[in-house]
Amino acid sequence: MTSTTPAADRRLMLVHAHPDDEALMTGATMASYAADGVAVTLVTCTLGEAGEIVSDDLAHLADGGPDALGRQRLGELGEAMAALGVTDFVRLGGDHRFRDSGMAWAPDGTATVADTTDERSFHAADLLEAADELVPLIRDRRPQVLITYDQFGGYGHPDHVKAHRVATYATALAAVPSYRPDLGAPWQVRRLLWTAMSSSQIARGIATLDARGLAEVLDGMPTDPSSPMLSSDDEIAVEIDARAQAGAKLAALRAYRSQLRADEGFLSLPEDIALEFWGREHYRFAGGEPLPAGGWADDVFAGL
């Protein structure tokens, strides 16, 4: 069952932590809805100032001051949004309002809080203060559906976890008529979804690559179904089949040349596998109006 609301009247908001997160986790979804005429808004919470620079020709950014990489990634974000066809993309509170918190790797391969964190970091920000930057955006854009991370932030990054908390809190606050009327008229988001990594999809991808002698392409991906990074089939509520937009997603990912090598790892997947791996994106239902019964929905607006 799909939505009965015309595409031109549908509005989708996504809240992500850093430039490139949106393309990695939701790029095909964004491109698909944008191509259909749905209003797509991306809110990015930081500029990713603490990211690891992987491109040799951009190594000089490490010595360019605290905002050099952020400026680079902001430019990359613009290129990525052009590839996805998304024109409404904003930073939470404006550019440089909240800073990338950095991270450390935990022994189990998930991310955790870094040993030292800038006091201006998103992780350290007051929750209400950060939510109050998102409330007016929700009230202004009036999305029926809002997508963000789960409580683990996908893989544990402190900025992803904070984005989850801010989006959840702001969604609730935005609907309260008596809360901060100076931030706009109240708006009730009708459905909240969390991004998900399908354990069955990952297992199929690894098995296919292994059969072709290419298992190292997905080296480091979680394989244990109990991993907090993976979602089982019964936890997933929506699968967006946007294989027609896989090329747009890959183009968006390749725009992030400071963060991703275009010829290595998952960006080097064979085309047929890339279509399956990049063209199908999954979501968990997290609140609001339930999705229609009967298996995975194929539309985040299904039933609305």
Image (tube, helix red, strand yellow):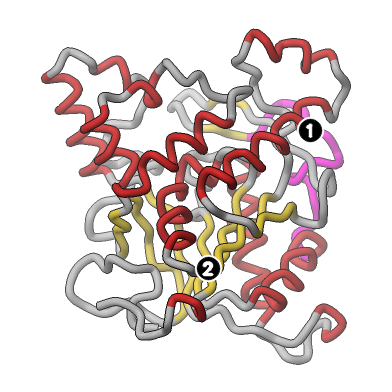
Where residue 180 appears, x then y in whole percent?
83, 82
| Camera-nearest residue between 162 and 31 | 31
Question: Residue, x 70% and y 86% (percent of image)?
Answer: 186
Question: Residue, x 52% and y 77% (percent of image)?
Answer: 144
Q: Where is 277 relative to 196, above or below?
A: above
Q: Main secondary structure of the magenta part?
A: loop
Whether residue 154 sits left or right of residue 259 in the image: it is: left
Q: Which residue is mark 1?
A: 71
Whether residue 231 sits left or right of residue 233 in the image: it is: right
Q: Where is 129 relative to 125, above or below?
A: below
| Camera-nearest residue between 38 and 98 | 38
Q: Is residue 264 magenta?
A: no
Where residue 118 appears, x then y in whole percent?
83, 34
Whether residue 229 sits left or right of residue 260 in the image: it is: left
Give the quarter of the figure containing the C terminus. Answer: bottom left
| Camera-nearest residue between 261 and 288 | 261
Q: Where is 93 relative to 279, above or below?
A: below
Asked where in the image residue 187 lies, by quadrant, the reply is bottom right
Look at label 1 and name its amino acid: Arg
Asked where in the image residue 14 lies, by quadrant, the reply is bottom right
Find numbered disc 2 in the image and state the secondary structure of the residue it sits on. strand
Label 2 vs 1, first from the N-terminus: 2
Where residue 41 appears, x then y in whole percent?
61, 62
- Please report the bounds of the magenta region as a residue range: 113-128
Mark 2: few/some/many CA within 10 Å (<14, 14-19, 20+): many
Q: Where is 11 relative to 82, above or below?
A: below
Q: Which residue is mark 2?
A: 12
Question: Residue, x 74% and y 29% (percent of image)?
Answer: 72
Q: Is residue 125 magenta?
A: yes
Question: Residue, x 59% and y 47% (percent of image)?
Answer: 81
Find numbered disc 1 in the image and state the secondary structure of the residue it sits on. helix
